[in-house]
Image (cartoon, rainbow, N blue to C red):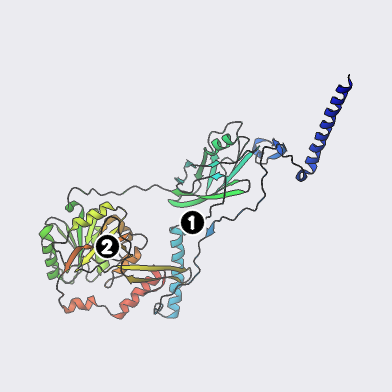
Amino acid sequence: MSQNQKIFFSVVIFVAVVLIGFYYMNDVFGENTNFQYIRAKMYYSEPENRNHLERKVLCSNNEPEIQNYPKPNIGPFPIEHFQSCTCKNTDPPDMPKDELEDLQKRRAKEYRQHQIRTGKQNDVLILAAPNTPLQYPIRGCRVTPLQKSLIPGLALHTQYRTIYKVSLRVQKGLLSVNDVKVDELVFGQNEKRLIISSDSLEQLNDLLSRVTYTSTIYHIKTEDLAYFSFENHEVIFPIEIRRLSVPILYNTGKDINSQVTILVKTFLRYAELNVLIQSIRVNYPNIKIIVADDSHDPQKVVGDNIEQYIMPPAQGWFAGRNLALSQVTTKYFLWVDDDFLFLNETRIERFVEIMEAVPELDVLGGSVQGNQFSYRLHYEEGNNEEGGCIWRSSGTHKAPLPGFKGCFFADIVVNFFLARTHAVRRVGFDPLLRRVAHPEFFIDGLGHLLVATCRDIMMGHQVRKNTGEYNRYRHPPKNDGDNKMKIYHFKNYLKCIK
């Protein structure tokens, strides 16, 4: 062997010794070297214990170092209302202290049940994690109770890793992956926590595209929260558990008579009612009119296509509204008072035109003698112990109904309005409110009914007449107002109203 060859082999051996030394130094003093992991060896026991993986990682300088940053708290956070509200110049219901205390206990129990029924426990705040490599559905993940459904949109987008591992966990269901093959690592099939691992990002995302959720509870409308994790990243997304509902549609036909029914509640005012009916028949000779009548000595209302329903005496306005509404078979109903007067400018077709163009709209009011009597409602939930506060202010929301000049959104409109039959039936009219009751319907419908008013749809009003018996019922004594406050206090969980 020549001298040059000896030198060459000596250099090779020296370099090899140095590299081996660095290797073992890295194994002991990893934080002081530049060597990183290259390869994963996975050791696991029998299949039933495969959730307990042990990994021994060897070197690679291609994989980025994982920063051990603190995991942010993204929720879920309950949305609580601890701040008390106040209505100026109002008092709590006037009743003896022991009676009020008993009322408060029963009210609190009913309110807790209301929160459960309306899914208040699912009303939580969830924050989006910053710079997460996880892809997940933020809205629209809906499943049928007790049935297996794919979770759409799950994926991981990250740089090269020797091993990719993600996990999911839920509370009200079971997770699984469809069609798992022998070489695919999935742990926790049909359990609340699922772990998926792979040395291929493509394979991992393929597995994530096959993840399913099956609720373990039966409920027609509730929610589960899914926690999706990778390394120090975690996100939360809702899974909506909902039983599909059947649509309720109305065959509107081709003319106004098959689209709208006119409703009126009458009490002791047959002269005014007959004038109203005559004014309706000028332009609408065939439209159906439903009359709810709780007069003491009922008189038969004569006319074609008129349905008169006799009630027990003095049952009140809202009881009459409920009765009339229960008999409607058309998509819309038009509410009028028994002393109104149809004008040439009273065009029901205009109401229908707007409602058909804006399917989200539930109630559309007009004007009576140029007055819209529109109001805005201001509601604060208050805290869970005392209840909320509500008050009203005159006028609309100053938010125009798009595409219709002179129409604005409001919360309360005049007694002359067109409404969707099905929408109003869901809210109803409280028959406990007998004589002074109009804003109360819109308070019950707040957040449920989308309301607007248009100034160019007009209705007339007959000249008011003084009838002693009617006025005695029309203007109730003070205790009627006190009873109404008790109803508000309990039913609407209100601390005060103004």
Q: 173 or 204, which is in the foreground?
A: 204
Indicate the quadrant containing the C terminus: top left, top right, bottom left or bottom right. Answer: bottom left
Disc 1 on helix, strand or loop? helix
Q: 220 or 249, which is in the foreground?
A: 249
What x and y, as percent, mark residue 329?
23, 53
* In the depicted structure, whether residue 198 falls above or below residue 8: below
Q: Which residue is mark 2?
A: 453
Q: Which residue is mark 1?
A: 122
Say whether residue 398 is visible. yes
Q: Is residue 445 left or right of residue 191?
A: left
Q: 87 or 436, which is in the foreground?
A: 87
**Amino acid bearing label 2:** Thr
* In the depicted structure, whether residue 364 falls above or below residue 490: above
Going 27% across and 62% down the picture, which residue do you hit? 453
Q: 121 or 486, which is in the foreground?
A: 121
User: Mark 2 or 1 closer to N-term?
Assistant: 1
What x and y, as percent, mark residue 16?
82, 31
